[in-house]
Amino acid sequence: MATDLSLGVVQDGTNDSAPTAGWAEASAEVSAGGYTPNYRWNAIFRFTGVTIPNGSTINSAVIKLYGGANWGSAPYDTIIRGDNVDNSGVLSITHCLTSGWAATTAAPTWRIPAIVSDTQYSSASIAAIITEITSRVGWTSGNAICIAFDAANFPTSGTTNYMPFRSLEYSSGTYKPLLVINYTEPAGGIVVPVFNSQYRRRW
């Protein structure tokens, strides 16, 4: 039977990937984008309590976000990546997309449209990312997952080439990002041993 899981982000922020790596906790918004001269910002989200049993089938998965201010000439393509570990740790300068991550092989592209403030959007499917992480040998139900919007494809020739989304900190979390997954637990059951006994009646 399929199960729906919806989790609010517990930590979000922006990881600078150029010209030097950096990390900043979100305030009202978390952004993915580029900025003159050659700056890039990767938006990163951490979700805890992901209660999906190891080896489950991930039927669908997206991140839902509310738009902030719309800057630049959308649409933009962002590459979505996951932290390919059993239990993703707290985000910091030493644990973000550009430092301390082994990114998932799955890396779908999401074409971000021209967003409208406080309107909710769904990312491209990240079912392959969630499958890759929850199929790891060391994955345990209840562990944490981190997802990043990699801004490698954003232009850096202007001052407004980025897309802000509402963060956990905005409006007391009313518009916080959500991880929404539909999954089916792996088939299982009780294995009952069958004994073949022969009886001979003696008269």
Image (cartoon, rainbow, N blue to C red):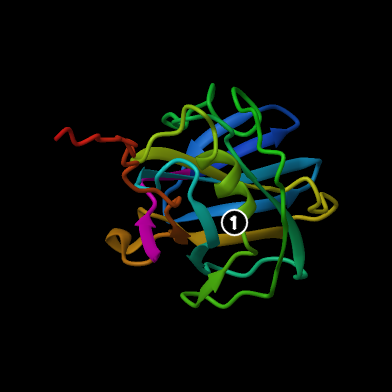
- Which residue is the extreme one toward the right? 157
Residue 125 location, quadrant? bottom right
Residue 135 location, quadrant? top right
Residue located 81% across and 49% down the image: 156
Task: Identify the residue under disc 1.
Answer: 127
Residue 81 or residue 19, whichever sits in front = 81
Q: Quadrant of the N terminus?
A: bottom left
**SS class, disc 1:** helix
Q: Is residue 5 left or right of residue 131?
A: left
- Residue 122, horizontal then vertical, whole percent: 56, 69
Q: Is residue 153 left or right of residue 146?
A: right
Residue range highlighted in magenta = 1-12
Q: Quadrant of the C terminus?
A: top left
Q: Is residue 36 visible?
A: yes
Give the overall secondary structure of the magenta segment. Answer: strand
Residue 72 or residue 15, whichever sits in front = 15
Q: Is residue 43 visible?
A: no
- Residue 11, horizontal then vertical, whole percent: 40, 43
Q: Is residue 108 left or right of residue 14?
A: right
Residue 202 vertical position relative to residue 74 in the rendered view, above or below: above
Q: Is residue 103 left or right of residue 152?
A: left
Disc 1: CA contacts within 10 A as few (<14), some (14-19) or many (>=20): some
163 in the magenta segment: no
- Residue 162, horizontal then vertical, whole percent: 68, 58
Q: Amino acid at mark 1?
A: Ala
Residue 82 or residue 131, whichever sits in front = 131
- Residue 3, horizontal then vertical, whole percent: 38, 64
Residue located 59% across and 56% down the image: 127
